[in-house]
Image (cartoon, helix red, strand yellow):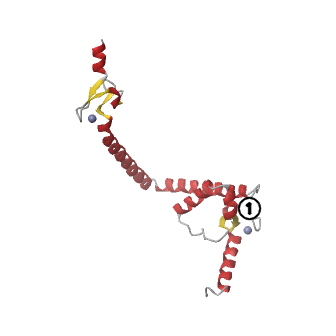
Amino acid sequence: MLETKEIVSEKRCRICHRLLPFWRFSVRPRNKDGRSCACRDCARPYRKQYYKQKKEVKKKYNETYRSKNKEKCNFLTRKWMYRLRLMALNKIARAYYATSLSCVKCGFSDTRALQIDHINGGGTSELRHMVYCRFLQKILSSPLESIRNNYQILCSNCNMIKKEEMRENYIWRGKHTL
Ligand SMILES: [Zn+2]
Ligand SMILES: [Zn+2]
């Protein structure tokens, strides 16, 4: 009885041919003895390869899906960006203890024309899609105090006026000519 138990508790790896204790083989419920035919050491590179391949297949699938459903994907991206932008605006408003979303200068409150302004310069207007997403995510993950020091909500008009004023200052200081 003891002997058979000992035999069962060991298994030969099909790849390295070592006789190893059972726990050195990963669990495979579909196999007869419930364990993999290769020991964990031998299975590791295969597993890595397997996941790498799986990842590549998934990537390819995503790419073809995206190219076949361009409009749907674009719509979802835009929807997600819209939500992200609103969340970022809300967080900035919260950092200023504001109860509603509005321009800090004139109080304009239509969210379609509200923008996130870098208080100390640094334009964000011409940011590309992904960069803009990362910018919004950065705002969403930073603490309220640093948001209060760095960002504010301005409407497009006030933002434009601020930019013009900064440009005029710049020219005035003689560092730049028109
Ligand atoms: Zn092995
Ligand atoms: Zn304004």
Q: Nearer the viewer, residue 43 or 116?
A: 43
Q: Is residue 99 left or right of residue 57?
A: right
**Quick check: can you spot residue 117?**
yes
77 lies above or below 4: below
The quarter of the rendered structure image containing the N terminus is top left
* Residue positioned 62% across, 58% down in the render: 139
Indicate whether 100 appears above or below 126: above
Q: Secondary structure beneath disc 1?
A: loop
As displayed, is residue 120 above or below residue 133?
A: below
Q: Name the outermost residue toward the top.
A: 1
Amino acid identity at mark 1: Ser
User: Residue 133, percent across and down?
Assistant: 56, 59
**In the picture, residue 113 is in which quadrant?**
bottom right
Q: Which residue in the protein does label 1 denote?
A: 102
Position in image of residue 95 (x %, y %): 71, 57
Ligand 1 falls in quadrant: top left
Front one among 167 and 145: 145
Residue depicted at x 35% and y 28%: 23
**Residue 151: in sight, yes or no?**
no
